[in-house]
Image: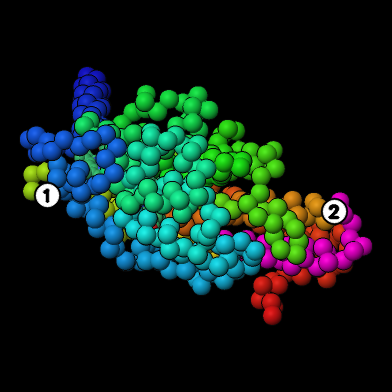
Amino acid sequence: MKRYSTYILAGIIVVLAATLTGVLVFMRNQPPAQRGFEPLVEIAQMEPDSSKWGVNFPNQYSSFLKTGTNDIDTTYGGSSQFSHLEKDPRQVILFAGYGFSKDYNDDRGHANALEDVRATLRVNETTPGTCYSCKSANNPGLWAEMGMEEFDKMKFSELGTHINETIGCANCHEAGTMRLIVTNPALDEALKAQGKDWTTFTRQEMRTVVCANCHVEYYFAGEGKYLTFPWANGTNIQDILAYYNDLGFKDWDYPETGTPMLKAQHPEYEMFTADSTHYRAGVACSDCHMPYTRDGAAKYSSHDVKSPLLTAEQSCGQCHTDVEYVVRRVNLIQEQVYTTKIATEDALVDAISAIKAAAADPNADAVLLDEARKLHRDAQFIWDFVSAENSMGFHNPEYILSILAESTDLARQAQMKAAQSVNDPSLLEVGTYYTQP
Ligand code: HEC
Ligand code: HEC
Ligand code: HEC
Ligand code: HEC
């Protein structure tokens, strides 16, 4: 009898707990409370000027403006434009012969995007207009007006005369409804090619997908420099590498070895969605990077997008009770990924040294040497997928450590093939970076 009532009690507790969880989940998924809200001004569709939207949404606008002046750094990220090349000089060797070996600064906040793309030394007379694709709130209007094909065909300098706004509200929102939308035609096309229709996505999905307008791997296809996401096989590193290899695409030739190389961009979306713990748990980019903030009675999404380590209480505390603990975990993860990444770079530099030496020898076995080049190309792209991703491993630690291991393995194989191609065991030397002149 006693045992029986224990069961009933336990049953009641389970039901209550389930109901409470349901209610909490429901509450989490409700839009944040708005002040009794009448739009003060009507915003034209694709209005490029964020200050006009700001009249209706002062909290979102003023928090967005902060991205223009943020300058606090964290151990591996943050908002200053520190030089990756000075911090990690191996990258000067890895990107030799390409613009990134001359100028490669860390990212800053959204309000600086236009200024920074115009200032980079990587831009010159031959730069295509496509480089404006993720830098300006003028784009949605221009894409609607002239089509992306025309936009991409223009030269950077020519297209620049139509562009005067940095990233803004129009890059992420539909005026009027304020719903989150895909604005970049390349993202729309890439999703469609995978049989996905973003207009059917849930609100929580859009809180991640809206960032994929820009925080993705891409390339410029063909003479018209058509902006394309290499997602036709899927968005994992192996899918993307296979896509580029099937296409025979290259970003540049490595000097002295003639290896056709690939440069990764900033694949935050691909890395995060590659089955990371947080993605699996239904967490969105915006949960951490745009946490809800209070202004009196109003609750709004902070548009001061930056490193969540600077706002850990709001960014992580909404789900984790022990914020100090999870921040320590981030530090540990990033340190491990950084150390592993440097070991991969050392292997890549050794491979490059060996391939250079072999390529200079007219008697080298052409087949083995070519295999070495191909291994170097693949190894470096996989490494770069991690290196160019801006979270130093945090977005998906297990996956990132596993692909770094793969990259190191391929780089060492490249070195071996190069040594074999000239039958010279001295090319198997490890740590050539430390003995470079
Ligand atoms: C669970 C929380 C979380 C989620 C979800 C998340 N991030 Fe992050 N993100 C971080 C942390 C932590 C860092 C590391 C910041 C640092 O090193 O200072 C980071 C770093 C970044 C950076 C570099 C920031 C800097 O300071 O330079 C970018 C860009 C970024 N994330 C974009 C994204 C995008 C896009 C998504 C979704 C596809 C996403 N993040 C999802 C927590 C998150
Ligand atoms: C229209 C393109 C675009 C969209 C959409 C976009 N970003 Fe960015 N983001 C950029 C660019 C470009 C930069 C670098 C700007 C610079 O360095 O001047 C950047 C920088 C960042 C940074 C670094 C900020 C810092 O202070 O170091 C973070 C974090 C970030 N974005 C997260 C996100 C998240 C999260 C989303 C989705 C909610 C998102 N971004 C949507 C283009 C975009
Ligand atoms: C990088 C993409 C991005 C940009 C740029 C952007 N927003 Fe948002 N905005 C978001 C996301 C993500 C949310 C959260 C939406 C949700 O939870 O459904 C949001 C939410 C909002 C909301 C709903 C209420 C809230 O705070 O959650 C308003 C209003 C808003 N933004 C206004 C603006 C204004 C005004 C601008 C320009 C100054 C702007 N946004 C620029 C991504 C962006
Ligand atoms: C919307 C909810 C949510 C937010 C916001 C969030 N997390 Fe999480 N986090 C989770 C869930 C769910 C898990 C997986 C279950 C677990 O281990 O608790 C998780 C797991 C983790 C783990 C353990 C992962 C592992 O595999 O070891 C760390 C570390 C972590 N989060 C750090 C952070 C940090 C740092 C932030 C803020 C930048 C953050 N989280 C923001 C929900 C969230």
Q: Is residue 71 visible?
A: yes
Q: At 53% from the left edge and 58% from the top edge, which residue is drawn?
A: 125
> In which image quadrant can residue 372 be found?
bottom right
Q: Is residue 338 left or right of residue 317?
A: right
Q: At 38% from the left edge and 33% from the top edge, which residue is drawn?
A: 144
**Amino acid beneath label 1:** Asp
Residue at mark 1: 295
> x, y (%) of residue 332?
44, 61
Q: Is residue 314 left or right of residue 391?
A: left
The stretch drawn in magenta includes residue 244: no
**Amino acid beneath label 2:** Leu
Does 342 sit above or below residue 320? below
Q: At 64% from the left edge and 65% from the top edge, which residue is drawn?
A: 96
* Furthest residue toward right: 363
2 or 1: tag closer to the N-terminus: 1
Q: Which residues are magenta?
A: 341-367
Q: Which mark is residue 368?
A: 2
Q: At 63% from the left edge and 52% from the top edge, which residue is drawn?
A: 251
